[in-house]
Image (tube, rainbow, N blue to C red):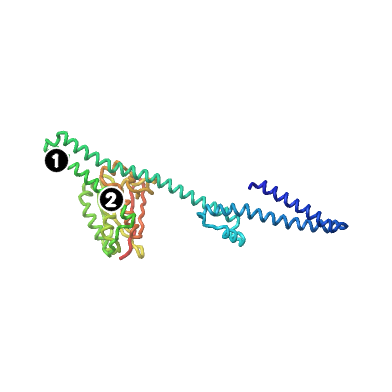
Amino acid sequence: MKTRYLSGIIAIFSTIAFVVALIIINSYFKENIFLPTVIATILFFIINYLIVRYWIRREIYEKVRTIYKNIYNFKVSKIDLKQKVKSSIIGLDQVNEEVTQWMEENNKQIDNMIALEQYRKEYIGNVAHELRTPIFNIQGYVSTLLDGAMEDPNLLKKYLLRADAGIDRLIAIVQDLDTITQLELNEVQLDITTFDITQVIRDVIESFELKAKERNINVVLQHQEAVMVEADKSKIRQVLVNLIENGIKYSKDKGGEVRIKTFDMEDQYLIEVSDHGIGIGEKDINRVFERFFRTDKARSRQFGGTGLGLAIVKHIIEAHNQTINVRSKYGEGTVFGFTLKKG
């Protein structure tokens, strides 16, 4: 009911009540006009109060209850609401505050949904692109062979090797997607043991010795002493492989350096992998752990990789209930750091 109608009804009822009370009381006190006027005035205020209270309960409380029902998914009963109002547990100021808070939370949820929808579209587009490239390459090589190139032994072997490389890339993408899915669904059981991560770092550095030498990149382990950590050894090795390989890929073409350091942090160790490479722009720094996100797409595909490495790294570290961070300056280099529990 609109406010003006409510005000009109209250005014009419209160006026009628006042006039009736004045007439009745005046009939008993014909000689004394002052007393009946005072009594009628008191009755007028009492009746006015009761009428206003009735309409407030009927109109305002019902609307407040409707608001609460919408906010809390119809969980507030009429009796509960009246008890809260009567006991001053809630007031109109609090209703306004809770409605404002509810609107802010819903706006945040809507913003998150919009961001997730945008991410979903980008992700599907990236998956399609990553799969399409090797598939089209394989199709091209096979079609060329079927068109007669297979009669030439040199071309036959050359195109079969290229098709095989494309198949390997497809397998790598599918395996990485499967790994991320398992990590996100907590389906990967970690085999937690105590081991020397320094030795694992040495092994990984040795595995990239030829690749680093080809690009004239120096990979340095700064601390040689044993560092005992408690984690899944194979998964942490996978983390180090991704980070060190990225360091080699994105370092400057000649004379670059990838450095691995460990820092003692009371009950944890911090392991940092730094490079003097191309760096990451400020607008991209918060997206480096997204699946298929590449800061330099041309350079990334030049050196291979599925675009899922850093996303897998993040999931592995978080599965250990640890943290990973990145800091970078465009054109100067990047540092990835992650923590592990002491062994």
Residue at the image point whose x is 40% and y is 47% from the top: 116
Residue at the spot of label 2? 176
Task: Classify mark 2: helix, strand or loop.
Answer: helix
**Distance between mark 2 and mark 1 Cα atoms:** 28 Å
| Foreground pick, 104 / 238 | 104
Mark 2 surroundings within 10 Å by alpha-carbon count, few (fewer than 14), some (14 through 19), many (20 or more): some
Q: Which residue is most to the right?
A: 31
The quarter of the picture where the C terminus appears is bottom left
Residue 300 vs residue 148, the one in the foreground: 148
Q: Position of residue 263 (x, y in %)?
A: 33, 60
Query: Callout 1: 10 Å neighbours few (<14), some, many (20+)?
Result: few
Q: Residue furthest top?
A: 147
Q: Amino acid at mark 1?
A: Lys
At label 2, the amino acid type is Asp
Q: Which residue is mark 1?
A: 157
Query: x%, y% of residue 300?
Result: 29, 44
